Image (cartoon, grey):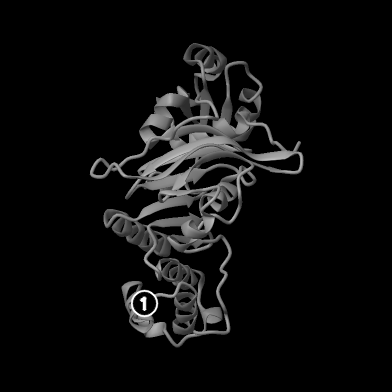
């Protein structure tokens, strides 16, 4: 496991330009440290995923990067601007899509985008709004009130508004919460197209399949950065051994296994259980008494979800 004060290496090899270059970023609210000494290096065109339980500091960290909050400690740059002293410049070049839909529901789509374009003083504003509506498939709905949109269409409008001023960095805070699977898939296809064109994206999510779509990921828990890297690096670095078991009355079996030495976690996966531990020998010894009929066991590769559940269970809530 890596220390809190660490560098998060970033990906696409085609471009080594650092868009985010920060270290020791810390934020406190009263006696609570909600972001604890986090460092990050992210290159241009990378899609970087933030995962972690609610209250882990993901949103606070994003807000410090884009100039909405000032860190209590730490230093570095975002888009080449000093995060402590040039926050106004950073804001001009960042698109930020918040968790909650934050546009005017009594204005239509075209009016909402026009309003945002005015704020950013976008040149050729009317053409920029038209191009944005067309690019995200919103043009046919341009006269529809924003408040009448479904979750997926609101998501598209919010993304269009975040991109209207052609930012260099896009911050997305749980953007796909509450939308249907097709809308999520379409959204991610758009994000990958934007990244391929050079836009850097930081995204917070609770969905493991979305995390696997990122070039790199980081896991935050209660202000601390516990692990980071590619999905493969994170799973391998956890050194977690996992057995899958099928059979009758798995709920009772789970209750017995959870109290055994060597068992880190027992999680239901459909009609099976995943039983994981950090020490392969100790885990095997713990489950061996049940490795007989009517149960069927097989060792499986630990998933990203197995790893994150394990990390969450080992983490201590900083508000307790």
Crowding at dot 1, Cα within 10 Å, few <14 / some 14-19 / many 20+, comes out as: few
Residue 192 in the image, given as x and y percentages of width and height:
32, 55
In the displayed image of the protein, which residue is found farthest to the bottom?
143
Residue 275 in the image, given as x and y percentages of width and height:
52, 27
Which residue position is annotated with label 1?
Answer: 123
User: Quarter of the image holding residue 236?
Assistant: top left
Number of marks in picture? 1
Q: 86 or 25: which is nearer to us?
A: 86
Q: 251 or 132: which is nearer to us?
A: 132
| As drawn, 198 above or below 266 | below
| As drawn, 282 above or below 162 | above
| As drawn, 286 above or below 147 | above
Residue 272 shows in the view:
no
Looking at the rendered structure, the secondary structure element under dot 1 is loop
| As drawn, 126 above or below 61 | below
In the displayed image of the protein, which residue is found farthest to the left?
14
91 relative to 262 in the view: left or right: left
Q: Residue at x 32, y 40 (%)?
A: 11
Q: 227 or 166: which is nearer to us?
A: 166
Quadrant in the picture for the C terminus: top right
91 relative to 71 in the view: left or right: left
Q: Which residue is drawn at 45% across and 66% down?
A: 162
In the displayed image of the protein, which residue is found farthest to the front?
85
155 relative to 31 in the view: left or right: left
User: Quarter of the image holding residue 239?
Assistant: top left
User: Quarter of the image holding residue 166?
Assistant: bottom left
Residue 55 in the image, given as x and y percentages of width and height:
64, 45
Q: 109 or 247: which is nearer to us?
A: 109
Residue 245 in the image, given as x and y percentages of width and height:
49, 29
Residue 152 shows in the view:
yes
């Amino acid at each position: 496991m890596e220390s809190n004060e660490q560098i998060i290496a970033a990906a696409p090899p085609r471009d080594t330009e650092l868009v985010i270059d920060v270290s020791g970023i810390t934020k406190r609210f009263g006696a609570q440290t909600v972001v604890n000494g986090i460092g990050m290096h992210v290159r241009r065109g990378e899609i970087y995923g933030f995962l972690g339980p609610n209250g882990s500091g993901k949103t606070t960290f994003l807000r410090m990067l884009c100039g909405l909050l000032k860190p209590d400690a730490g230093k570095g740059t975002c888009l080449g601007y000093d995060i402590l002293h040039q926050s106004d410049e950073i804001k001009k070049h960042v698109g930020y899509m918040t968790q909650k839909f934050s546009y005017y529901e009594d204005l239509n789509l075209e009016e909402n985008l026009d309003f945002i374009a005015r704020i950013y003083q976008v040149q050729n504003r009317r053409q920029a709004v038209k191009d944005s509506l067309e690019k995200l498939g919103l043009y046919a709905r341009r006269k529809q009130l924003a408040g009448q949109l479904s979750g997926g269409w609101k998501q598209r409008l919010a993304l269009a508004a975040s991109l209207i001023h052609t930012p260099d960095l896009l911050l997305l805070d749980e953007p796909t919460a509450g939308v249907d699977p097709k809308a999520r898939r379409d959204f991610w296809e758009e994000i990958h197209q934007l990244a391929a064109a050079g836009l850097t994206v930081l995204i917070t999510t609770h969905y493991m399949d979305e995390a696997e779509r990122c070039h790199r990921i980081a896991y935050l828990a209660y202000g601390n950065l516990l692990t980071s890297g590619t999905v493969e690096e994170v799973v391998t670095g956890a050194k977690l051994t996992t057995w899958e078991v099928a059979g009758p009355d798995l709920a009772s079996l789970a209750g017995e296994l959870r109290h055994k030495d060597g068992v880190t976690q027992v999680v239901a996966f459909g009609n099976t259980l995943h039983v994981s531990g950090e020490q392969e020998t100790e885990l095997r010894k713990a489950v061996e008494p049940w490795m007989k009929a009517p149960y069927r066991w097989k060792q499986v590769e630990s998933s990203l979800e197995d790893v994150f559940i394990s990390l969450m269970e080992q983490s201590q809530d900083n508000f307790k």
